[in-house]
Image (cartoon, helix red, strand yellow):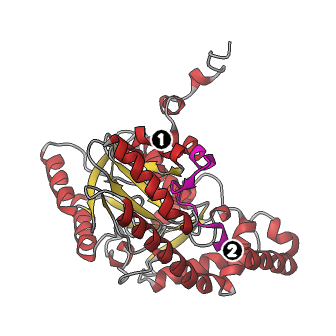
């Protein structure tokens, strides 16, 4: 009886039915429940959450706006957040006259809304390979072909992209409708797209007529090196939609993000986006940012994450074997590791959990087969004092499989 599918599952779409047979991102959250050092998920560390300041903002919003703060549309503070985002994006060099801001329920909601406006089944979306698994899932929901392109220390390989585009055009195959890139401190590799590659990518977008979705979820968390202008700041053709989020800076639970796009594109996306944002949360975060707390928070966050990265890199240097390689990001949350070719990090995971450490296998970040011997570690969440022992345990179980 219990082995039978529940009534109605036969009416699910083919894409929805396929999720019943796959582990999916959500079930991997079970890793976090393991009695182990959690280097798996890109969660901010709890001590970083500005609970006192947010609590004060709640009081101010209720005192100033009362029931209006809980009504459809919210009050003045809900609108102030949009102004704050617009000013910050303008400070990055994005033209506030040529572009417009749309607040969303996080970055993934923004990406899903962009897909609704641009994609039809059979279209092509170009992505970095590897890339954020949550975005892969969103694209798959729209029945598109996902074309993965290699990433190195300077971000997406634009020479390989140029060759791929030329080959597609010569063969009469469709070129991408969208190209998705995490331009700063990429998830999962930590790579940042270089300035030269950004300019070349924009030229290719013009030549082959596609739109770039620039995910800037980690842009504010640079703690080394010189900042690189966003693609949206370098764009003269209106081909870039920039996505941002407060999840990595204020807290994931506020569920607020945004996109910046030319106004006609912004309006089209807004018309198709499912639902609206939580206006009460917008009001609270609007006051929080308006009071200067966001800008006050960033220096301490950057310092804390720099320390965490350094502690993790030191542990990797001490314990991983010579054949292992890893990235050294200038910001963000993640380090990408490639072990010996004989290691399968999917198979290794259970042993690693038993040994007291969790990670995400590299295969999760590929739209196709790939990443078998790779894994992603996050330095953002666990106690840095636990890094050394966790990496020593990881090295031991990997050595057993090598």
Label 1 crowd (10 A; few <14 / some 14-19 / many >=20): some
Label 2 crowd (10 A; few <14 / some 14-19 / many >=20): many
Q: For mark 1, give the secondary structure.
A: helix
In the picture as drawn, the residue positioned furthest to the top comes out as: 1
In this figure, which residue is indicated by the disc labeled 1?
Answer: 351
Q: Is residue 41 magenta?
A: yes
Q: For mark 2, give the secondary structure.
A: helix
- Residue 285: which disc? 2
Q: Position of residue 301 (x, y in %)?
A: 56, 78
Q: Position of residue 31 (x, y in %)?
A: 57, 46
Q: What is the spatial separation of the Cα atoms under label 1 and label 2, in whole angstroms? A: 42 Å
Residue nearest the viewer, comparing 297 with 84: 297
What is the quadrant of the C terminus in the image? top left
Does 351 sit above or below residue 242?
Answer: above
Residue nearest the viewer, comparing 221 with 183: 221
N-term mark: 1 or 2: 2
Does 76 sit above or below residue 349?
Answer: below
Look at 81% across and 66% down and name the residue there. Answer: 70
Q: Position of residue 310 (x, y in %)?
A: 43, 74
The reply to whether residue 41 is in sight is yes
Q: Is residue 190 magenta?
A: no
Look at 65% across and 54% down and name the residue there. Answer: 275
Q: Which residues are magenta?
A: 30-48
In the picture as drawn, the residue positioned furthest to the left comes out as: 170
């Amino acid at each position: 009886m219990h082995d039978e599918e529940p009534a109605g599952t036969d009416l699910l779409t083919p894409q929805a039915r396929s999720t019943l047979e796959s582990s999916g991102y959500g079930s991997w959250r079970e890793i976090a429940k393991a009695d182990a050092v959690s280097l798996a998920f890109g969660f901010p560390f709890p001590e970083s959450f500005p609970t006192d300041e947010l609590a004060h903002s709640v009081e101010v919003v209720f005192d100033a706006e009362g029931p209006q703060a809980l009504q459809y549309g919210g009050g003045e503070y809900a609108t102030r957040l949009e102004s704050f985002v617009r000013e910050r994006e303008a400070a990055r060099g994005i033209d506030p006259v040529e572009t417009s801001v749309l607040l969303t329920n996080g970055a993934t909601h923004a990406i899903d809304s962009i897909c609704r406006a641009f994609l039809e089944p059979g279209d092509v979306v170009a992505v970095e390979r590897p890339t954020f698994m949550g975005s892969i899932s969103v694209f798959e929901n729209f029945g598109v072909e996902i074309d993965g392109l290699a990433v190195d220390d300077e971000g997406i390989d634009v020479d390989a992209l140029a060759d791929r585009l030329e080959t597609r055009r010569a063969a009469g195959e469709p070129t991408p409708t969208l190209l998705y890139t995490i331009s700063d401190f990429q998830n999962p590799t930590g790579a940042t797209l270089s300035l030269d590659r950004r300019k070349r990518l924009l030229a290719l977008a013009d030549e082959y007529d596609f739109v770039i979705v620039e995910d800037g979820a980690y842009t504010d968390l640079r703690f080394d090196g010189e900042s690189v202008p966003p693609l949206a700041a370098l764009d003269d053709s209106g081909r870039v939609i920039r996505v941002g989020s407060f999840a990595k800076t204020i807290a994931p639970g506020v569920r607020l993000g945004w996109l910046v796009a030319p106004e006609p594109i912004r309006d089209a996306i807004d018309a198709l986006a499912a639902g609206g944002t939580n206006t009460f949360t917008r009001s609270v975060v609007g006051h929080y940012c308006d009071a200067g707390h966001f800008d006050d928070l960033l220096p301490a966050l950057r310092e804390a994450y720099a320390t965490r990265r350094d502690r993790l890199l030191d542990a990797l240097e001490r314990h991983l074997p010579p054949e292992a390689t890893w990235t050294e990001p200038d910001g963000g949350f993640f380090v990408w590791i490639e072990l010996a070719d004989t290691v399968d990090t999917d198979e290794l995971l259970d042993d690693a959990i038993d040994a007291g450490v969790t990670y995400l296998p590299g295969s999760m970040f590929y739209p196709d087969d790939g990443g078998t011997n790779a894994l992603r570690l996050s330095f953002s969440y666990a106690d840095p004092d636990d890094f050394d022992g966790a990496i020593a345990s990881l090295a031991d179980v990997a050595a057993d499989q090598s």
